[in-house]
Amino acid sequence: MGVTNLVPAASPGAAVHEVLPVLPGHLRNLIAGLPPAVLNRLEEIRLRRDRPLMLGLTGGDAFIAPDGKLVKNPRAAYLVSACDLEQSMQLISGSSLYALEEELRNGYITVSGGHRVGLAGRAVVEGGRIKTLKQIAALNIRISREIAGLATPLMPHLFDRGMGRIYHTLIFSPPGCGKTTLLRDIIRQISNGVPEIGLPGMTVGVVDERSELAGCHRGVPQRDVGVRTDVLDGCPKAEGMIMLLRSMAPRVIATDEIGRKEDVAALEEVFNAGVGVLVTVHGSSLNELTARPALNYLFSLKVIQRLILLGRSRGVGSVEDIIDGRTMHSLGVRLC
């Protein structure tokens, strides 16, 4: 099976500028002043108290010096202060951390555009469960990119022309390999239709628990997820799939990062209703997935028809394999 890098060139730094408003002005200026070629490779911005300002770039990490230049030596980098973190949290929360208690409990906040800010600090525990986080000491701002056409090479392998249906599809990879970005474009193409392969536009229901797929603002998607797509934003996956199934009559239901037994139970109902399924999950191999009880049960149902393994062998979004879910054998397809 040949690999392919599905990520085409995007406008340099376009997604980065969506997250700059959550940074204090001087940090915003440092990052905005980077060359376009660097901004286009930017995947993460990491702020750690009293430690260097670090960027996660395609191909490796780098640090930013106080004069705005990229440096490899962390000792030459700008040191993030407690004030920097406090200002960032105020900007992220709109000066109301109390309103984000649920997000703090989960350890991340999704900001406008579907970008996720991971949090680390002191956990407040009640009754053996995390109630919230306080004394935030680190932020990881993960850049979400929208790339129209990303899924185009895959679409013929996800659509059963004879039956006129989307194959039940599971996308898996380690973190940071483009699962959400790929899923978003698959949703868009199914919703709009792909005449070249005989795929008519279909109604798609999306359960966007973490507001990353559609990037909703006040319930309205800010990302292009297609003209026939309905989104349940901020809704738990298991409950959301059943709600969409009963209320919106979708032809396809999509959601990101399944894994709990409740998710799989909801998927069973979706399968039994004759509705197509698109999901993602963290994992670097089939063995790793089947070692998880809920996913092992899902595979035992023999209903998943396509598994897409993503990696980074030729950059983020490299399709490493397309697997037949019934036989668990590679289809041997080479994407060009």
Image (cartoon, rainbow, N blue to C red):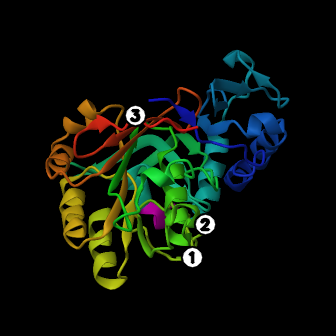
- Label 2, residues with CA under 10 Å away: few <14, some 14-19, many ≥20: some
Inspect this view and state whether residue 32 appears.
Answer: yes
Q: Distance between the residues labelled 2 and 3?
A: 31 Å
Residue matched to label 2: 224
- Crowdedness of circle 3 by 10 Å Cα count: few (<14), some, many (20+)? few
Residue that label 3 marks:
332
Q: Do the residues labelled 2 and 3 touch (CB within 8 Å)?
A: no
**Sequence-wise first label, 1 or 3:** 1
In the image, residue 82 lies in the stretch drawn in magenta? no
Amino acid type of the residue that numbered disc 3 sits on in the rendered structure: Gly
- Which of the two residues, 47 or 229, is positioned nearer the viewer here? 229
**SS class of the residue under badge 1?**
loop
Q: In this view, does 29 lie above or below 226?
A: above
Q: Of helix, strand and loop, which one carries label 3?
A: loop
- Magenta segment's dominant SS is helix
Q: Residue 227, labelled with which disc?
A: 1
Left or right: where 202 falls relative to 304:
right
Q: Which amino acid does label 1 sit on?
A: Val
Task: Find the distance from the CA under tag 1 to the CA under tag 2.
Answer: 8 Å
Mark 2, secondary structure of its residue: loop
**Pointer 1 with pointer 3, Cβ within 8 A:** no
Q: Earlier in the sequence, mark 2 or mark 3?
A: 2
Q: Nearer the viewer, mark 2 or mark 3?
A: 3
Residue 80 lies in what quarter of the image?
top right
Q: In the depicted view, which residue is nearer to us: 313 or 206?
A: 313
Is 231 displayed left or right of 24 in the figure?
left
Image quadrant for the N terminus?
A: top left
Q: Is residue 145 left or right of residue 240?
A: right
Q: What stretch is highlighted in magenta?
A: 97-101
